[in-house]
Image (cartoon, rainbow, N blue to C red):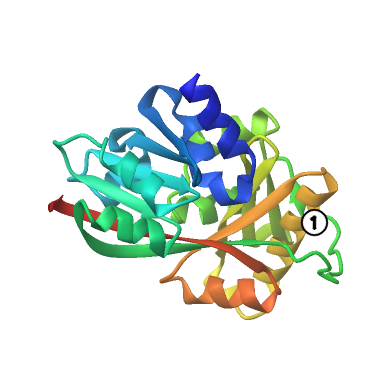
Amino acid sequence: MTTGKARDYLRRDQLRTVSLLKYLQAFPGDTRLLHAEGAEGEAVLLLLRVAASDYDRHAYPDAHHVCFIASDHPDLTLRLVEQLPEDGVIVFKLATPADERAAGERFRLRRRTAFHSFRMADASGWTDVPGLVRAVPSEAGWRLFEERGYTRNWLMPLLVSGRAFVVEAPQQEAALSTCFAFENSPGLWEIGGLSTHPAARRRGLARQVVQSAFREVERCGLVARYVVEETNTASLALARSLGLCEVQCLTHFLAEGRR
């Protein structure tokens, strides 16, 4: 019953809870859900084994778990945080200052980085550039993805199953700029992997492929988000120049022991 209530809560506002839904869908055997409710509302904590996530395994090699929280009130957050395992290093990925303060009551937290999440504005006014959406990347597109660390073994099964597509801005069959979109959780897709050949930068090509990815997801009746790490100033500038609306900033903290 608790798991069912937790899932119902997460589905109410998918843009807010997308990270929890993403890992719950991708790694059901490596995640654990905790749920709390009271007069203040509800809260859900998702605990992910670091070993299951390529990004976290490389970014936080000494950590054992990643903790995500969606909460209506810091008192509920604190109730869930108090149930975390006593042993092992934990990475917290928190979306609100209130959750940060609540987790900080029990753990000494050191900030590491943050990821900004954007959606398309309700009235974008964009002009379509036809012919950029592809079922699979060209060989030049694959090279751009692989230079960013995205492997064929990860992306190809999503493409083959129809749970992803690619956008390329080509010139004479060579991909100069590319990105992909994939199903993050039911009804919600994520745009990522943006890469532009160094010789083709500052031509507006990245803008074209990101716009086309958003519009393709919209045409399918789905919602898309675009995620950028705070250190990627060029992609942040692109998101803001496109008029995308920021919906969340997920800040990473490494827990350096309990208080």
Reply above or below: 155 against 149.
Answer: above
Q: Residue furthest front?
A: 39
Q: To which quarter of the image does residue 27 belong? A: top left
Q: Residue furthest top?
A: 1
72 or 223, which is in the foreground? Answer: 72
The secondary structure type at the circle numbered 1 is helix
Query: Left of 251 or right of it: where is 158?
Result: right
Q: Amino acid at mark 1?
A: Arg
Query: Left of 94 or right of it: where is 59?
Result: left
196 or 87, which is in the foreground? Answer: 87
Q: Give the image location of residue 4, x and y in percent.
A: 54, 23
- Neighbourhood count class around disc 1 (C-alpha, 10 Å): few under 14, some 14–19, many 20 upward: many
Reply above or below: 9 against 166.
Answer: above
Regarding residue 50, the answer to whether it shows in the image is yes
Query: Left of 160 or right of it: where is 250?
Result: left
Q: Give the image location of residue 130, x and y in percent.
A: 86, 59
How many numbered markers are drawn? 1
Residue pointed to by mark 1: 215
Residue depicted at 84% across the width and 68% down the height:
123
Residue depicted at 63% across the width and 42% down the height:
182
Residue depicted at 47% across the width and 50% down the height:
146
Q: To which quarter of the image does residue 147 belong? A: bottom left
Regarding residue 171, the answer to whether it shows in the image is no
Q: Give the image location of residue 34, x and y in percent.
A: 39, 32
